[in-house]
Image (spheres, rainbow, N blue to C red):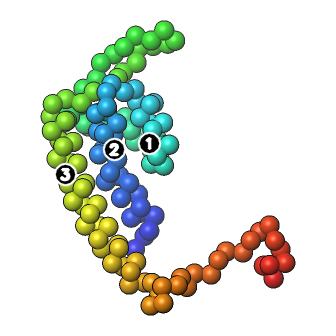
Amino acid sequence: MNIENAQVQMRKGILEFCILHIISRGEVYASDMLDELTSARIMVVEGTLYPLLTRLKNAGLLDYKWVESTSGPPRKYYILTDLGRNSLTALNETWQELAASVNSIVGKAEQHLKPANGSTSVTPAPDPSNPSANA
């Protein structure tokens, strides 16, 4: 299994969902979406975001409007359509069910990995500020 590929696929799978959520709060400019996704540690670049926004618009899930800017060209602000809101509601239900299922499985695996005495078997990392303790 290629871990990096699996991680990328997991992130791609939730990117649309996150974008719809961001737009659901009101009109939003693409660079603000990028900032929010980045601050949430969902790394995405313009070359990924803009084609995705176009695909969502073509699917009827969102629309946009142009707003004049005092500091440059007009800006495109994205908004959800009624179909987009309905789709987001359905995706929310799916997410809740999926998250509960995955957490159930992961929780059982974590319980299985714990030693019977409840202690952890993980050795603490060396303290780089105390070289004598690392010898």
Disc 3 designates what residue? 93
How many residues crowd mark 3 within 10 Å: few (<14), some (14–19), many (20+)? few
Q: Quadrant of the C terminus?
A: bottom right
Residue 37 or residue 75, whichever sits in front = 37
**CA gap, disc 1 to disc 3?**
21 Å
Question: Picture quarter containing residue 76?
Answer: top left
The answer to whether marks 2 and 1 mark residues whose Cβ atoms lie closer than 8 Å is yes
Which residue: 40% across, 77% down?
110
Question: Picture quarter containing residue 128?
Answer: bottom right
Residue 51 location in percent, x, y? 34, 37
Residue 118 or residue 124, whichever sits in front = 118
Secondary element at tag 2: helix
Question: Picture quarter containing residue 82?
Answer: top left
Q: Earlier in the sequence, mark 3 or mark 2?
A: 2
Which residue: 34% across, 47% down?
15
The answer to whether marks 1 and 3 mark residues whose Cβ atoms lie closer than 8 Å is no
**CA gap, disc 2 to disc 1?**
8 Å
Residue 119, compared with residue 90, is above or below; it is: below
How many residues crowd mark 2 within 10 Å: few (<14), some (14–19), many (20+)? some
Residue 90, compared with residue 71, is above or below; it is: below
Q: Give the number of the mark in front: 1 or 3.
A: 3
Disc 2 designates what residue? 18
**Residue type indicated by callout 1:** Leu
Q: Residue furthest front?
A: 117
**Residue type indicated by callout 2:** Cys
**Residue type indicated by callout 3:** Glu
Residue 17 location in percent, x, y? 29, 45
Disc 1 designates what residue? 37
Which residue: 84% across, 78% down?
132
Q: Quadrant of the N terminus?
A: bottom left
